[in-house]
Image: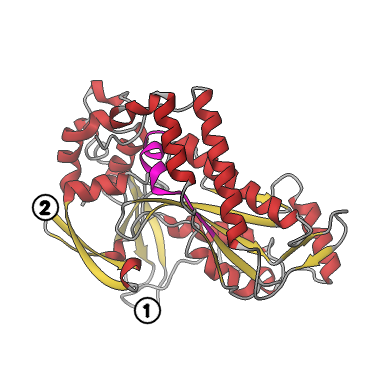
């Protein structure tokens, strides 16, 4: 789709795209093609040959997430503890959507901060749990229809470290924290943070947002957001550590849409499957012009270097190993079952090199790399970026 329609899209909209959005178009169009080079493989028995082209490794590419997800899950398995886990979702109201699109690094960062401080504060309150919890938070910015819908998925063990940091306070198996309290505290913290950012001149208001440069207009936006309930949803517990890894895999390395959801593309229009949560979770098919589909996809390209998976409490990087050792000692456990399952070692050939996969043609020989393929052409679409556009505005996707 990006190879067929990306060139025309760039010609129309390159002047309003951020650099990482233009890079995403170029990377996805070149992914696993001769433009990125690769290698030739051959069977050592029947001689069957095939080409394998390199991936773009762009974190927004639906093809390139499987290996990154596998590496991440393997590292996380050693951090799981054998207690029930809860899934808490914090959603940013629609009023802040345009502001987030033009200030993604700032607004998404404030979303992380407000949600994490809310969970840590309420959990530490003796009226609720009275413990230091640990959790990871994953940012998603899309809904099923690819429209802008920023929210955080937080995966939290039920329980936490005691105030003295030497014991474990167990939480309930059927209830984590009251969502009404979480919602009110989250709302107050985010409003205070975004107001402070505005006062410090850390927000930009281009296009249709220009009226928000007036202090009274910005205050009206905040007042409108305060008058409504903010959505915080705690899903039922989904079991202990063995189930957590499979569950995490559904959220951590997702992109806005997977290739499997795309039904048809005729060069001009694309149809994709989506679930309509507002209509009793009905499965539907949506058809969009290629230009609109690419626009929606690019809304979810994050700023360069922005961390979309973050850790808090006893899972924060600084003291993670030390605090997990205390927790496991208190719970009388070493490694969880999930962490103890080490991957099988790769089979080796007689010469000491790893054995390749079984040949799909003869089913007896092994596939091995026999030649390196250098890139045969520059990445597609790169020539379409005029010099004036290569360093264009970096304020976000302009919807005006």
Q: Residue at x 65, y 54 (%)?
A: 119
Across and down, in percent, residue 374 comes to 32, 42
Does residue 86 appear in the picture of this structure?
A: yes
Which SS type dominates the magenta stretch? helix
Q: Which mark is residue 268?
A: 2
Quadrant location of residue 220?
top left
Q: Earlier in the sequence, mark 2 or mark 1?
A: 2
Cβ–Cβ below 8 Å for labels 2 and 1? no
Magenta residue check for 98: yes
Residue carrying label 1: 363
Along the horizontal axis of the image, is 305 left or right of 121?
Answer: left
Quadrant location of residue 6?
top left
Magenta residue check for 259: no
Task: Note whether 286 is above or below 322 in the view shown.
Answer: below
Element type where label 1 sits in the image: loop
Alpha carbon distance from label 2 to label 1: 41 Å
Q: Quadrant of the C terminus?
A: top left
**Category of crowding for the residue at label 2, using alpha-carbon neighbours closer than 10 angstroms: few (below 14), some (14–19), many (at least 20):** few
Looking at the rendered image, the disc whose residue lies closer to the viewer, 2 or 1, is 2
Across and down, in percent, residue 75 comes to 62, 58
Residue numbers of the magenta segment: 89-103
**Category of crowding for the residue at label 1, using alpha-carbon neighbours closer than 10 angstroms: few (below 14), some (14–19), many (at least 20):** few
């Amino acid at each position: 789709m990006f190879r067929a329609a990306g060139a025309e899209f760039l010609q129309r909209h390159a002047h309003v795209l951020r650099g990482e959005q233009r890079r995403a178009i170029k990377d996805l169009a070149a992914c696993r093609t001769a433009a990125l080079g690769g290698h030739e493989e051959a069977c050592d028995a029947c001689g069957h040959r095939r080409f394998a082209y390199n991936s773009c490794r762009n974190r927004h590419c639906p093809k390139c997430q499987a290996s990154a997800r596998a590496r991440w899950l393997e590292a996380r398995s050693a951090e799981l503890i054998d207690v029930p886990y809860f899934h808490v979702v914090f959603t940013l109201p629609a009023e802040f959507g345009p502001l987030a699109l033009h200030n993604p690094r700032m607004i998404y960062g404030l979303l992380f901060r407000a949600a994490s401080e809310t969970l840590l504060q309420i959990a530490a309150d003796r009226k609720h749990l009275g413990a230091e919890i640990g959790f990871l938070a994953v940012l998603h910015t899309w809904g099923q229809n690819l429209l802008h819908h920023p929210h955080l998925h937080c995966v939290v063990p039920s329980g936490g470290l005691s105030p003295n940091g030497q014991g474990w306070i167990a939480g309930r198996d059927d209830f984590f924290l009251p969502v009404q309290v979480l919602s009110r505290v989250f709302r107050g913290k985010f409003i205070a943070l975004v107001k402070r950012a505005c006062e410090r001149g850390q927000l930009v208001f281009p296009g249709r947002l220009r009226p928000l440069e007036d202090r009274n207009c910005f205050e009206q936006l905040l007042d409108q957001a305060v008058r409504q309930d903010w959505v915080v949803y705690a899903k039922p517990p989904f079991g202990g550590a063995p189930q957590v890894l499979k569950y995490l895999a559904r959220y951590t390395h997702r992109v806005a849409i997977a290739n499997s959801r795309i039904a048809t593309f005729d060069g001009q229009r694309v149809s994709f499957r989506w679930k309509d949560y507002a209509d009793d979770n009905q499965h539907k098919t949506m058809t969009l012009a290629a230009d609109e589909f690419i626009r929606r996809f690019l809304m979810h390209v994050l700023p360069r270097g922005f961390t979309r998976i973050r850790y808090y409490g006893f899972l924060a990087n600084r003291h993670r190993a030390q605090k997990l050792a205390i927790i496991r000692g208190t719970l009388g456990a070493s490694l969880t079952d999930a962490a103890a399952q080490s991957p099988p070692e790769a089979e080796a050939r007689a010469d000491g090199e790893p054995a390749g996969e079984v040949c799909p043609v003869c089913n007896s020989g092994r596939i091995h790399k026999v030649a390196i393929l250098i890139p045969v052409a520059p990445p597609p679409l790169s020539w379409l970026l005029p010099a004036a556009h290569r360093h264009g505005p970096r304020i976000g996707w302009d919807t005006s």
